[in-house]
Amino acid sequence: MQLAQQSSLNIAIFGLSLKVLSEIKLAIEKLIPQNVLVNWTNIADPKLQVLMVNDMFFDAPSIQKLIKNQNIRLLRLINNAAKHGQIEENILYLPIDETVYLKDWLSQSADTDTKHISSTTAQTIDISRQDLYTIVREILNPENGTIQVFDQNGILAMVDPRNQWAWVSDQHPNQTNASLNTIYATMNDRQAFNTIQRQDLKNWLWNVLWRSTSFHKFVQQQDCFYLKQWPQPEDPKDRHDILRMSACFAQGANIITVAEKLGLSVDRVTQFVSISLATGLGTLIQKNQVKYPPQHTHSEDDAGLMRKFFGKLRRRLGF
């Protein structure tokens, strides 16, 4: 194996039982020379070089996006005792009773990654604004089973959209960026979060997105928005502004109008509406549905003018 320039190999294996996972890791570590360090990582690692994934999860949208956007080598893992250990068209047949095929494949992976290691390290997942909005909505979709939410910095949380719970990782900064994505969670993944206290999913996600500057562009500044459910802000320094915006949009309001009335930047109000829309706290409305600021009727205006007129008249006459 030509590994002179390769000091490490970053490998992730997804979707297997603990027993099979341990067997594959042991086999690979025996096949890799001692001067090469194998880093067992996860699918969110931006430096990922080799991905081995259970064929059951291969068509998952998050796996497909990962393959499309990152320069990694892939092995689909399929159980087939008759072929035990053979590799055909990037399919590895389990169990690995014969290791020569895997040894050759790993050698090619190491050589390939040596040539492309700099570009792989620098690369991040780049997805469109619409895809990003869809991902946020999928995190909250009650039709989904348990999923993992991750980005290029690792796993953010284990999420149960059906019951609207989140188990938040303490190993991840409490914000994210345009690399946000999801993946189906296995039983082993869920067990890793067993000791973590669950949180309300929607509140957790709203606060994560509020702290993340990538999420300001889901709406236009001329849009009007109606807030159905108030967010529960965690950041004390922002709480006052967030509650003031909530009070305005709870009546139905225009973004620019709220910015002007509260003395806030349009970008900050757009951020609030974008995140509240994406997390399902409200909906866009038409201009004629706006109720903020309250509009006075002509009769009220006329009555006000009359009161001012008689007030001046009384003062002049000395009453």
Image: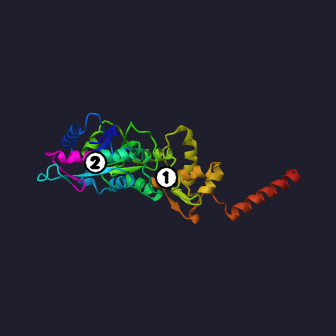
Measure the C-alpha gap from mark 1 to mark 2: 47 Å
Q: Is residue 94 magenta?
A: yes
Q: Tags 1 and 2 in contact by the CB under 8 Å rule?
A: no
Tell me the magenta residue range: 88-107
Residue occupying image coordinates x 53% and y 38%? 236
Which residue position holds label 1?
276
- Nearer-the-camera pick, 319 or 252: 252
Crowd rating for badge 1 (residues with CA inside 10 Å; few <14, some 14–19, many 20+): many
Q: Is residue 223 left or right of residue 146?
A: right
Q: Is residue 84 left or right of residue 188?
A: left
Q: Of the residues under marks 1 and 2, which one precedes in the sequence?
A: 2
Q: Residue at x 32, y 41 (%)?
A: 9
Q: Residue 20 location, x and y as percent? A: 19, 43
Q: Quadrant of the N terminus?
A: top left
Instruction: Give percent across and percent down for residue 179.
Output: 43, 49
Q: Which mark is residue 108?
A: 2
Classify residue 38 as left or right of residue 289: left
Q: Is 86 rendered above or below residue 302?
A: above
